[in-house]
Image (cartoon, rainbow, N blue to C red):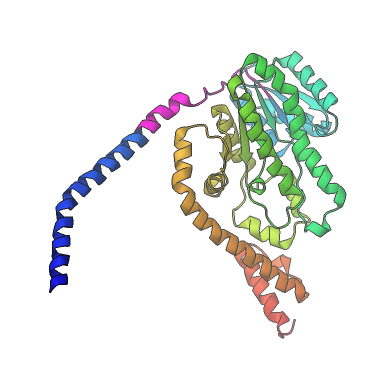
Amino acid sequence: MFFLEEGYTLWSELSGWRPLLLVMLLVVGAFIVAFVLLLYMVSPLISPKPLKLNGSHVVVTGGSSGIGKCIAIECFKHGAFITLVARDEGKLLQAKKEIKRHSINDKQVVLCISVDVSKDYGQVQSVIKQAQEKLGPVDMLVNCAGISVAAKFEDVEVGLFRRLMEINYLGSVYPTRAVIHTMKERRMGRIVFVSSQAGQVGLFGYTAYSPSKFALRGLAESLQMEVKPYNIYITVAYPPDTDTPGFQEENKGKPLETKLISETSGLCQPDQVAKTIVKDAVQGNFNSSVGSDGYMLSSLTCGMSPVTTITEGLQQIVTMGLFRTIALFYLGSFDSIVRRCMIQQRKCVTVPWQVIGSRGSFYAALELSITRCDGAPH
């Protein structure tokens, strides 16, 4: 009886505090809402001033095809002067004809320069100087030159690890080094590094490719801290699989596991990717991603990367837990794919690729093949 009376007394005392506790919670909630609204209002005031593409000089490396060419077209549509840099002179001239069809005035120019941006810094510096003498100082540099190799670690030729770092990493370092001094002097500029979603998460088959793309982020983060006081903004783009000649070439020798994992995010068109990259670069956004998967990956892997607006930072804080939960399911799915393929390879099964028309039909073929290996006649 004594314990009942004590419990009743305690409950009565707590009940007396409930209205006050409710008021305190409401006040705290109101302050949080007000703070968030204030950040939304202040955010545009601290964002970089958008770059005007009309009349600007945009240099695009790897601009003779794929995403690079589409970025050049997108900038040309907004009145920019374009310098295309690539190795194949024939492809450059063909790309130039295609780009010029999108001009908005008679003054626009497309300049083509054939050079390997990964070989010799002195040569890269020379051609950038040549481009600036003809079209003026570079307002935006887009580093899009790159190649991809998809193969199991032990199947990659040792020389390819060096070659991919030269093209995908040094091929971006050299042009950037060539334009940065002038941009600092003018206290303005945009620099874009085209990485990949494989530069955000390491995947089966990309032991040579992923490190070369991961390196771009480290370069971009360090460089952004150096050049931000000069009103120069860096953008790192993380496109998904994109329907380009490079992607088609990569698919020829891509491991089965890599193909299946890649199919989970679909295939984008280069013009769609280019529009997103150009928009983010103009705005001065550090991260540029495509689609819901890209947004989730960018939020998950943001780490200590800079944010362009306070709003962006708040979105990353709020969504981190949810996106990490979703990512764990993705990782489980990828591991399952690898295990299934390992079983198939151990039992020496050849997948009938001619019947594959979609991801679902592949799984059907894979299950059928594994079943046959367990004793059914072939």
> Where residue 238 sits: x, y (%)?
62, 42
> Where residue 68 sits: x, y (%)?
69, 35
Q: Is residue 262 above or below residue 168?
A: below
| Snapshot quadrant of residue 328 | bottom right
> Where residue 229 sits: x, y (%)?
59, 21
Please tell me which residue lies in front, 81 or 128: 128
On whether residue 352 falls in the magenta region, the answer is no
The residue sitting at the front extreme is: 2
On whether residue 52 falls in the magenta region, the answer is yes
Q: Is residue 71 left or right of residue 294?
A: right
Q: Residue at x 70, y 22 (%)?
A: 180
| Snapshot quadrant of residue 258 | bottom right
Q: Residue at x 69, y 77 (%)?
A: 370
Placement of the N terminus among the 4 image quadrants:
bottom left
Please tell me which residue lies in front, 292 or 172: 172
Chain part drawn in magenta: 38-58
> Where residue 321 sits: x, y (%)?
47, 52
Placement of the C terminus among the 4 image quadrants:
bottom right
